[in-house]
Image: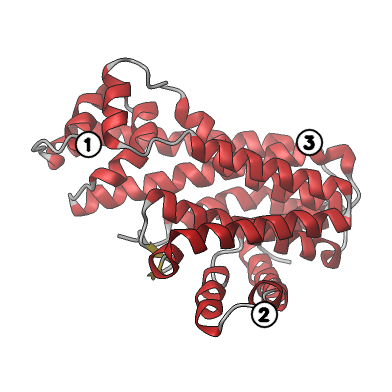
Amino acid sequence: MNNIVEYWNKVRPLIDNEISRLLPVFLEKMPNEHAEIFKESIEGGKRVRGTLTCLVCQALGGKLEEALPRAVAIEYIHAATLIHDDYVDLDTVRRNRPAIWTLEGSRRAVLFGDLILSYMINMMTDISKDDAKAVAEAIAAVAMGAFQEPLNPLRLVEDITTGRFPSGLYDVIIELKTGALFGAAAKLGAIASNRLDVADRVYRYGSKCGEAFQIADDLREILYIVETRKVNVNKMVTLFPACLYYSNESIKDMLDIIMGKPVDVASIILDRWVPLIERMSNDIDVRINLALKEIEGFEHNEYTELLKYAPRHIVRLMLESKVEA
């Protein structure tokens, strides 16, 4: 295997095939008009987390066929969290398609996400206790991270003006909401290869990859605002923890945007967001380097070499993705 892109291109179709093979479990009892909509919510995506499961497994001497069911589980879990997130965040588009809740309503969207999560825990329980524990802990962490995200603009303004908003919340959110699922993906690779002795290390490796991925996602949104000079209040609420974390001096400008006051966005970009973007870019590098420290000393083989390149490839995949307006 010559490079990480070649590995991704090889493994991703295998994961997609296994995901499709499992779809009838969820769809066979649904009317066709609902089944097709839910099918589209599972299909597509970068398969970053599932590919990471496979790569870690092979780097630790395991077989790809042992990793694939676990890769499928982590991708289904990720899909379920997106279905829930879209409704909670009131996002109307996902992968250039209408979000599930806009077509099926909030009740069906939430229940379908719940169905996926419960089935994946059950599926992992059938494989091993360690697998079930890894995914259950990840699901709980993601929920806790999402629970702490600010959603209501008025409540956010009140929390900021009264000093109740914690400046370090962003670190907590990205560790739980994104880092935990990446960490679980990597840990499942260790479990698949029967290398529980390094499971904690690869979890931390995956977690830091996930944190870098999330910072890149938020940076991408900020770069889109810079490019278009347009800012949406709801999007600003979502981005506020990142902006506060990396640019405490821009709180007043962000409050003005959230409260709907007239703001010279171009001026904010020049005065505040250039250093903000630089700090976020630097922190991505910091998290990637922390990830790489966790795999130092691993036995040398073609797959451990790819593990060294995976974090930057993961970040690049996010930065090159199109922002869904």
> Residue shown at 37%/17% (left/top)?
164
- Mark 1–mark 3 distance (CA, rounded to whole Å): 40 Å
| Residue 206 seen in this snapshot | no
- Farthest residue in the right direction? 194
Kindly identify which numbered label has been placed on residue 200.
Answer: 3
Residue 13 appears left or right of 158: right
Q: Is residue 11 above or below residue 211?
A: below
Amino acid bearing label 3: Asp
Amino acid bearing label 1: Ile
**282 or 136, nearer to the observer:** 136
Q: Secondary structure at mark 1?
A: helix
Of labels 1 and 3, the one closer to you: 1
Amino acid bearing label 2: Glu
Q: Residues within 10 Å of mark 1 (few under 14, many from 20)?
A: many
> Residue shown at 72%/36% (left/top)?
294
Kindly identify which numbered label has been placed on residue 258.
Answer: 1
**36 or 274, nearer to the observer:** 36
Q: Residues within 10 Å of mark 2 (few under 14, many from 20)?
A: few
Mark 3 or 2, nearer chain start? 2
- Mark 2–mark 1 distance (CA, rounded to whole Å): 45 Å
For disc 2, the marked residue is 28
